[in-house]
Amino acid sequence: MEQKKTVIVTGFEPFGEHAVNASWVAVRELKNLGLGPNVDLHITEVPVEYQAVQNLLPSLWDQYHPQLVVHVGVSGMATTVTLEKYGHNRGYMRPDNCAFCPKSGCCMDGGPDCIKSAIDMDVVCKRVNNSDLGVSVSVSKDAGRYLCDYTYYASLYLGKGRSAFVHVPPLGNPYSAEQLAQALRAVILEMLDLLEHSTEKQLCQHSH
């Protein structure tokens, strides 16, 4: 029997002009869809607060030992479901929901400037776009230097790259919550597939 995989998917609480945060609505909808019988899916709503993120993420990684953590955020500028390649350490000057921002403008003092996801986002994007899903997926190298980017960087650091960040457009612009959830499901299943094959490759290399 195949061992169950654990996947954590997070969305954000409302902030600014996003009185309803499409990311959390889509993640809740994803929970209803599920990721199939072999995946334990846990969802969490993340506060739009730097300090809360610093407290929450280590406990998620420690408690569940997930194969993959996917953070979902909303971007008012997005018109596609956007896969982020990198998390950035510096440039956090925008105050959060508590009017706080890190003094150093850094996510992790002394950490690398930029961490790349272990998942090849170009491959995920191509596969999902070829699948007749009806939702357009694209790839980005800049997650925006706010809580999305901050959360992504911290998670990549903690999970040694086994993390992903997906930006979704606001609800109805152009996709419904149901369409966004379907897209997230397709994206996450492709990510798990890629991770599994990269682990198999590493095992093959070690055994020779």
Image (cartoon, helix red, strand yellow):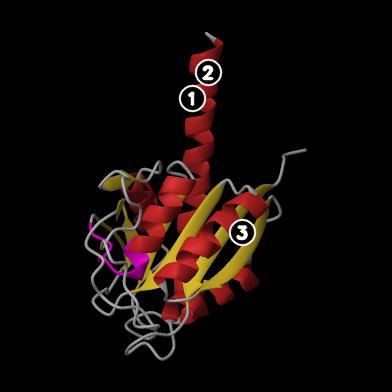
Tell me the quarter of the image containing the N terminus: top right
**Residue found 41% across the figure and 54% down from its top:** 154
Is residue 183 among the parts visible in the rendering?
A: no
Give whichever of 68, 185 is nearer the camera.
68
Tell me the tag on residue 35: 3
x, y percentage for residue 195?
49, 40
Q: CA distance from mark 2 to mark 3?
A: 27 Å
> Which amino acid type is marked by label 1?
Lys
**Residue found 31% across the figure and 72% down from its top:** 101
x, y percentage for residue 120?
36, 43
Which numbered disc, 2 or 3, marks the residue that appears first in the sequence? Answer: 3
Give the answer, above or below, for where 200 lies relative to 169: above
**Residue bearing mark 2:** 204
> Which amino acid type is marked by label 3?
Leu
In the current view of this chain or complex, which residue is farthest to the front? Answer: 103
x, y percentage for residue 102?
32, 67
Q: Is there CB contact under 8 Å for labels 2 and 1?
A: yes
Horizontal relation, residue 170 to residue 207: left or right: left
Q: Quadrant of residue 33?
A: bottom right
Q: CA distance from mark 2 to mark 1?
A: 5 Å
**SS category of the residue bearing label 1:** helix
**Residue bearing mark 1:** 201
Give whichever of 107, 74 is nearer the camera.
107
Is residue 26 among the parts visible in the rendering?
A: yes
Which numbered disc, 3 or 1, marks the residue that appears first in the sequence? Answer: 3
In the current view of this chain or complex, which residue is farthest to the top? Answer: 208
Q: Which residues are magenta?
A: 142-149
Q: CA distance from mark 3 to mark 1?
A: 24 Å
**SS category of the residue bearing label 2:** helix
